[in-house]
Amino acid sequence: MTGKLKFKIGEISVFNTPFALIPMASIKYMTEDILAKNDSKALNDLYMWGWVYGYTVTKELIKLFNLKKFEERYKISMDTASLVGFGDYQTLSFKRADHARFKVIGNPFAKQFYKSDQFVCHYLRGMEAGGGTLVHEISIDNLEFECAARNNLFCLHQNLSQENIDKLDKKFVNKQLDRNYLRKRKIEFLESIGDDPSKFDI
């Protein structure tokens, strides 16, 4: 991160991308608002907003460091994720164009919700999936299997290819992802910034 975070009057940039410092309270309020509505579309919108974050930051990382190999893209993006403020990322397993399984230790965002009985990391899951799509070079989505909002210790997340998601219990998946809706939104976003969705089989 040395030299990559720049402050000017009225402007912050990280990896040559305009940034703003946003307190966790803001994302918590957005999440609480959406969870209270019990609205699947709104929850998927929250996930998609995170997806845009992950995609745009990872795109700049890849360009800045000229990351051509999967292992380089994976390591740099995971190291960066641990610096963003959502907890310490610890990889459990990963395979290119297939999956990445990781723990997010001490996630301060999710811990704000403890003792909840819900998974709350919808925005964060979106961030991980957006970045994962560029790292794996295929359409990736993210599912949460454990949450610090429930255990006060860690979150367990998995970036998964669409084929791997197809193998999981549909009820579990559908609580976190509306894949048809998200596919349309991803296509709209990628086309709006001049990127080709078909490059990722979206």
Image (cartoon, helix red, strand yellow):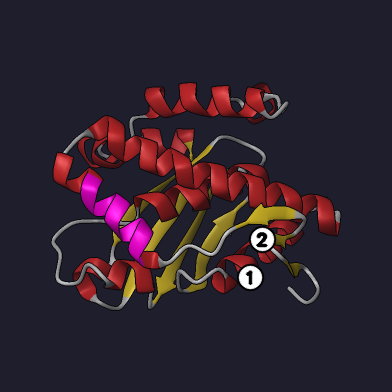
In magenta stretch: residue 29: yes
Q: Which residue is mark 2?
A: 10
Amino acid of disc 1: Asp
User: Residue 19: x, y in percent?
Assistant: 63, 57
Amino acid of disc 2: Gly
Q: Count neighbours of disc 2 (C-alpha within 10 A) and say few if under 14, some if 14 to 19, many if 20 or more.
A: few
Q: Count neighbours of disc 1 (C-alpha within 10 A) and say few if under 14, some if 14 to 19, many if 20 or more.
A: some
Q: Which residues are magenta?
A: 25-33
Query: The N terminus is located in which quarter?
Result: bottom right
User: Residue 105: x, y in percent?
Assistant: 41, 76
Quarter of the image for residue 167 reads top left
User: Residue 104: x, y in percent?
Assistant: 43, 70
Res. 79 mark: 1
Among numbered discs 2 and 1, the one appearing first in the sequence: 2
> Which residue sits furthest right?
66
User: Residue 40: x, y in percent?
Assistant: 24, 33
Left-right relation of 199 to 163: right
Left-right relation of 132 to 106: right
Quarter of the image for residue 197 reads top right
Q: CA distance from mark 2 to mark 1?
A: 28 Å
Q: Is residue 67 visible?
A: no
